[in-house]
Image (tube, rainbow, N blue to C red):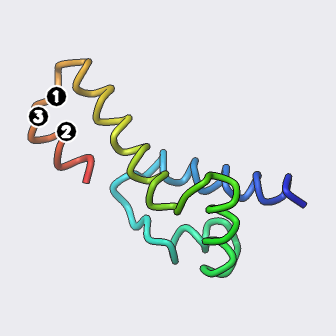
């Protein structure tokens, strides 16, 4: 059963990666995972040791850090893109 939940959460991670500026609310991510928002919250918390918002924040910060190291994108653009 956990394997099914892992696949669902990997779909969510792919969705966040593909559209970091999109609607990444718990409700929207629950739809991607094909779970109710309450069940999604429990599964996400159990498998990632925290709420989905932490995953979204971590992925946005990672993307911003990569752009900062690259040095070709203005800081203001990076900040706006990171949300």
Q: Position of residue 81 (x, y in %)?
A: 24, 47
Report the disc number at residue 73.
Answer: 1
Query: Quick one: label 2, few (<14), some, or many (20+) residues within 10 Å?
Result: some
In the displayed structure, would residue 67 be above or below residue 13?
above
Q: Is residue 21 left or right of residue 37?
A: left
In the displayed structure, would residue 70 be above or below residue 51?
above
Residue at horizontal 61 percent and vertical 66 percent from the top:
32
Q: Position of residue 5 (x, y in %)?
A: 78, 59
Cα–Cα gap, marks 1 and 2: 7 Å
Q: Which quarter of the picture shows residue 69?
A: top left
Q: Position of residue 73 (x, y in %)?
A: 16, 28
Q: Are marks 1 and 2 in contact (CB under 8 Å)?
A: yes
Q: Nearer the viewer, residue 31 or 55?
A: 55
The first of marks 1 and 2 along the sequence is: 1
Residue at horizontal 11 percent and vertical 34 percent from the top:
75
Please identify the quadrant where the N terminus is shown: bottom right
Q: Are marks 3 and 1 in contact (CB under 8 Å)?
A: yes
Q: Which quarter of the picture shows residue 36?
A: bottom right
Q: Position of residue 27 (x, y in %)?
A: 52, 77
Q: Are marks 3 and 2 in contact (CB under 8 Å)?
A: yes
Closer to the eye: label 3 or 1: 3
Report the disc number at residue 78.
Answer: 2
Q: Which residue is mark 3?
A: 75
Report the disc number at residue 48.
Answer: none
Please identify the quadrant where the C terminus is shown: bottom left
Q: Which quarter of the picture shows residue 77?
A: top left
Cα–Cα gap, marks 3 and 1: 6 Å
Residue at horizontal 43 percent and vertical 64 percent from the top:
24
Q: Secondary structure at mark 1?
A: loop
């Amino acid at each position: 059963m956990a394997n099914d939940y892992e696949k669902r959460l990997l779909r969510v991670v792919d969705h966040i990666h593909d559209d970091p500026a999109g609607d990444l609310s718990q409700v929207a991510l629950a739809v991607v995972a094909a779970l109710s928002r309450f069940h999604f919250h429990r599964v996400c918390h159990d498998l990632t040791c925290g709420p989905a918002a932490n995953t979204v924040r971590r992925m946005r910060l990672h993307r911003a850090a990569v752009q900062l190291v690259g040095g070709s994108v203005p800081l203001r653009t990076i900040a706006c893109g990171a949300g």
